[in-house]
Structures are given as structure tokens and as C-alpha cells.
Amino acid sequence: MPWKEESVMSLRREFVELGSPSGVNRSQLCRRFRISRAVGYKWLKRYRQEGVPGLCDRSRRPRHSPRRTQVPVEQQVLRVRDRHRAWGARKIRQRLLDQGVNRLAAASTIHAILRRQGRIDPAVCAPHPPWQRFEQDAPNRLWQMDFKGHFGLGNGQRCHPLTVLDDHSRYGLCLQACRNQQGSTVQQALQETFRRYGLPERLLMDNGSPWGDDAEHPYTPLTVWLLRLGIGICHSRPYHPQTQGKEERFHRTLKTELLQGRSYWDQAQVQRDFDQWIEIYNFQRPHQALQMVVPARRFQLSARSFPEVLPAIEYGSQDQVRKVLDHGRISFRGHGFRLSKAFRGYPVALRPTPTDGLWEVYFCSTRIAQLDLRVAGQDA
């Protein structure tokens, strides 16, 4: 299948960045990007020989560019700043180093240049309170997912940005302009994300619709689907957004560098800017929490591929299996127990505990409830 025309360069750039490290399963990567192996290896070879310019179509760009005349350091700094108006001195310096510029001034000197040239607003530079950080020790151990605050569009609709971030690398896996926050919308976006990057071990979300984890709706069809994929579900503490600190910081960066002061007519216009910005965030923007390394340097594909057809749910021979009825209840040893309507139609397994009369309920490999036969009519 050919590249999508509207994002051909960003797709090629992401493909070669993810396919360049040694040990990567490049055949699997080609399948996830929906291109042939011949095309994939062609772009990898050109990238190794020529770098990013080699990713352009031959008919659109000359093989050799004339040698550029060097410009003063101050002009180089201002050029990067004008392209990325929210970047500070340290990010600009690191970006120029990544581009091969030598003999750069210190970050403090670059900051002085920006201030002298009127590129810094003192009010905007006020210090922000630091987040208390935790970090997984490898990519794909934990992904964080959330909706950024929605905003209005010129056509009268509203845009709900859905974001997914790898906890270890801060790699932006999904930045989707959604029309609503329904579970089916999130599932469709996650399917495309899983097809490209594979499956994480766990997903961290906040509370409420469409994620679940409140007293009345502990599970939703979306989280049940994730459990079937073998993805662990965890939720942030209620009223504690710092649990998802990386997502909160990502949202603040998105607002500052892209959305602030802009207006859009429709979802398609928003998505075009999202696609361009996330490429800069993943591959160009030095990340201070990563010692000024870009997120792509720390991310790698998951070894777990997305199954297009879900396997049948199977339990052990010693398990007591019950089917969840339409109202979300099961019957076991003369008692009725309520689980959740999200599981209706699915089989669950009941396993005894060392405590007499106390049973645990499993859906696939996840414990979802506990039943106490000593309390008649108890909800799970």
C-alpha cells in the first residue's frame, strides 16, 4: 500500500528513525507502516547515505545542494527561535548542535541574545513549579493517555485532542483531533496507534468516561477491550492530576508551542498542524527531562503486535466459568452477583481463595472482582 500523500515526508522520517537502530525487526516495521520491504529498505539506505535530504523524491530535489555560506551565530540562534517561538536557550543550543553547528556559545549567551533581540517576554519566562517525576525503566512498560481540554472550531463543532505518551521516552504516540470523547472514538484512534507501535504493558488514564474506575462504572467497553488485548489498566488518583504529570506537561507544551493564539475552521485543519508538530516534538525538540535528548532516541517499537482478530477467551480446567448476563450479573451457587454491564456476553472465571466462601473473579488474565458467598445478594 502506498504512503499517505498528506504526510509522506513525516511518515518516511518516522520510519527511518525507528528502523535505523540495530536489532529492529525491519520486516515487521514495514508491515506496520503498510509498505513493501523493497520500499522500506530503499528509504533506509538513502537515509544512511544522505540523511534527511535523501528522503525527498528524486524528481523534487537535486542530488547535491550547493554549499551554504556560513552565517553569524546570532543569526543561527534567531532563525531557530523564530521557527520555534516557545523554545528556550538550552533547547536552541542543543538543536543547533544536533544540526552539526560547531563552536556554539553557552546557553546563557544564547539567552542574552534572545533577550537583547526582543525574543523573550519576561512575563512568559516566569518559572513554573516542577513536577514530581517517576519514570518507567524501558519503553512500552507504561503509556499515559488523556484528553486535552477541548476548544471550539469555526464550523461550530468542538475539537477534543486525544494524546498518548510513552512514559519512559516521552515519545508522542498519538495526537488525534477527535470530534467527541466517546469510547468508540478512542478505540478507533488506539487501533491505529497499536498497529504502528505495538501494544504496551499498561495504560494509565484518569477517572470517569470513557475510561471507567468510578463507583458506579468501574469498567467500560473500552477498558474491557484493552483487557482482552492483554493491556493492564491503571487510573490516576481522583483529583490528583500530577499522577499523569507527563501528560499534563505535554498538554502545556502543545498549548504553548502550537494552539495558543490560533484558531481553526475544522478538524482536518487541526490534524494537519498536529501531524507537523508531533514530528518536531518527537524528532527535533530536545527534552530537558531527557538530558536534552529527543524522545525518538529513547523510544523503540513494542515486541507485542496488535492482533487484528482477537483470540477466543480461554480459562483453566479448574476454573468455574460463568457468562455475564445482559444486566451485568452472574449467578453462582444460588447467589446473584453484579459485576458490570461492560462484561455482558463475556465469560469470566471464578477461583477460590484460602478464605472459605471467598472467590475471585477473573476476566482473561485480570482480576476484576471478589465474591463473598457468606453475604447473600452482595454486589461484586
Image (cartoon, rainbow, N blue to C red):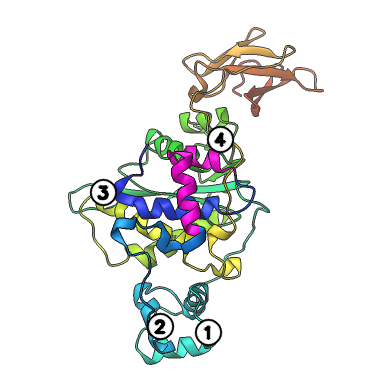
Q: Which residues are magenta?
A: 25-47
Q: Which residue appears at 57% of the width and 67% of the height?
A: 293
For badge 4, the amino acid type reads: Ser
Whether residue 128 is situated above or below residue 378 in the rendered picture: below
Residue toward you, 269 or 352: 269
- Of label 2 and label 3, which has the lower sequence position? 2
Work out which residue is located at the far front of the displayed protein and give it.
63
For badge 3, the amino acid type reads: Ala
Residue toward you, 373 or 341: 341
Q: Which residue appears at 61% of the width and 70% of the height?
A: 291
Residue 7 percent location from the top left of the image = 34, 51
In magenta segment, residue 253: no
- Of label 3 and label 4, which has the lower sequence position? 3
Which quarter of the figure is the N terminus placed in?
top left
In magenta segment, residue 28: yes
Q: Residues within 10 Å of mark 1 (few under 14, many from 20)?
A: some
Q: Which residue appears at 56% of the width and 27% of the height?
A: 228
Residue at numbered disc 3 = 268
Residue at numbered disc 1 = 107
- Of label 1 and label 2, which has the lower sequence position? 2
- Of label 4 and label 2, which has the lower sequence position? 2
- Residue 198 in view, yes or no: no
- Residue 315 in view, yes or no: yes
Q: Residues within 10 Å of mark 4 (few under 14, many from 20)?
A: some
For badge 2, the amino acid type reads: Gln
Question: How far apart are the alpha carbons under marks 1 and 2?
Answer: 14 Å
For badge 1, the amino acid type reads: Ala
Q: Are marks 1 and 2 in contact (CB under 8 Å)?
A: no
Mark linked to residue 305: 4
Local secondary structure at mark 2: helix
Magenta: main secondary structure equals helix
Residue 315 percent location from the top left of the image = 67, 17
